[in-house]
Amino acid sequence: MSAPAPESAAATRKRAGTFQSLAASFASWRTAAVTLQSFPSGLPLGLVLVAIPAWLAIEGVDIRTIGFVTLAQAPWTFKFVWSPLMDRYAPPFLGRKRGWALVAQAVLAIAMIALAVVALHPQRIWPIALATIAIAFAGASQDIAVDAYAVEVLHREEQGAAAGARSAVARFAFFLSGRVIITAARWVSWPVLFAVQSVVYLPAMVLMVFSPEPEEAPAPPQSLREAIWDPFVGFLRQHRAVEIAIFLVLYKFGDNLASALVSPFLIQVGFNQVDVGVASGTIGLVATIAGAVIGGAITTGIGLGHALWVFGFLQAFSNIGYVLIAQTGVDRPLMYGAMAIEALTSGMGTAAFGVLLLRLTQKEFSATQYALLSSIFALGRTLAGPIAGVLTDALGWRNFFLLTIVAAAPGLAMLQRFAPLGVRDPEFVVEPRRAGPPLTRAALVRRALAGGVLGIIIAALISALLSALHTLRATAVFDLATPLRTIVTPAGVSDWIASCAVLLFGLVCALGAAALAAAQHGVARPARAR
């Protein structure tokens, strides 16, 4: 043991429990700032994803129109598209990340006031849709800036407690702007609620002004090309980069499968709506927030590698509670306990995962890389829902939840590749370029085209397969050809968005294939004319 010395904040955080770890996140102004910034960061998504669709349904807007408005959540999925602009350029105040966050919060305040005004006429859907899209775009931009700021400002020993507290505060904000606002609308009009939420961004802007700048602010990319290209190459130069990318999709895949259909499962078993509401809206929320805080503290104490392994196993086996419910039927103590354990372990895994994203992200490309990595992570959650519905039809609830335990294995297998069992803190090192001549630009373009075409084919097949599986549940007919034709020849707005998403995925794959080749082999510089 080391000689007694004045205890550091890191040592204190290592022993922190549930409430102590939340206090530890405020041990410095850096961790306090990123934690508090998570509150305004969590508000827009809850509003767009939960509250606005519910409000439109209450006002009698038809379901197809509501479905169109919910497409406004797309900016959170594709925020990596414009994040290079936030790495490359800076507003003339507060530095790059704090400046962009302040701009986004100002837009959010204005957009919320606009939504409050147009909410006086809920049947005029286009103004509402435009205000919602503005809120979504500004909210996603705020997330880019706030996440990048956390990457740049936090010290390594602060990341665990900060990641757990950030996740807990953001989840609470999501709940307030989503579920709570729906309940409050029984007594207060929707326009007033929207106007009140706009006021929240004023103290958030004050907080951003007084948040500390990073001690060593990284130099910005010298060109927009560098801001787009170098984040891909920089990530793919890391040891086991491909396995890490696959891990980001698969680590919580079993957990995502289980949580996708928990509410329909409980209703079908025989629990009433009050039971399900208490389980998901109260017990689940509290357990998730507690899990995030505890998980962040434990990650600081035992190390990121150990935490990812421990929480990975806990996430997987927490679904046993749902297996028991499927066997025994209505048992409220069992159901509440199962929900609490699953939500607690899920929150713990999310906290450790947040630390991983912070450490994977290179500070000079903090906006683009963090946005890209979080989008890769979200891909597993997006795919889980449709797959879960088909599996439950084929297997039944009991066997489905047993399968979700097994579904955690591929993610843990990928974890073994870059953080073997027993390693406390994996080191993410840059690999040297492979021996041999560097690639010419023509060879790089060929790699990009091949990756882009392959990405478009894979995205089109996945999109069509999910659509076919969805219709299979209703018609008992598996039709893959029709959704493929819809992607090629889109008709409605949702079809065009799906087709654009396929093309965007292909573009990302093209960039990824070219960046991987450049990271491994280098790129030959064109000869200069003498």
Image: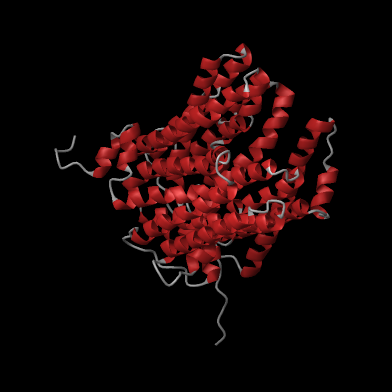
Q: Position of residue 98 (x, y in %)?
A: 41, 61
Given residues 517 and 17, the one toward you in this image is: 17
Q: Look at the image and name its color scheme.
A: secondary structure
Q: In this view, does 184 lie above or below 207?
A: above
- Image check: 153 left or right of 459? left
Q: Position of residue 52 (x, y in %)?
A: 62, 46
What is the x, y in percent for residue 97? 43, 62
Looking at the rendered structure, the number of numbered marks drawn on it comes to: 0
The quarter of the displayed image where residue 395 is located = top right
- The residue located at (55%, 56%) in the rendering is 112
Camera sees residue 506: yes
Q: Residue furthest left?
A: 4
347 left or right of 474?
left
Which residue is drawn at the image coordinates 51% and 40% (left, top)? 175
Instruction: Depth check: give the residue in front, 47 or 471.
Output: 47
Looking at this view, name the residue that lies furthest to the bottom.
530
Q: In which quarter of the image is the N terminus?
A: top left
Does the image show residue 155?
no
Task: Kindly indicate the quadrant of the structure image that contains residue 248.
Answer: top right
In-image side of 379 versus 461 (left or right): left
Against 137, residue 351 (above or below) is above
Q: Looking at the rendering, in which quadrant would you find the C terminus?
A: bottom right
Eyeballing the image, is 235 above or below 57? below
Is 514 positioned to the left or the right of 244 in the image?
Answer: right
Q: Where is residue 320 in the image (x, y as percent from the top left)?
A: 55, 20
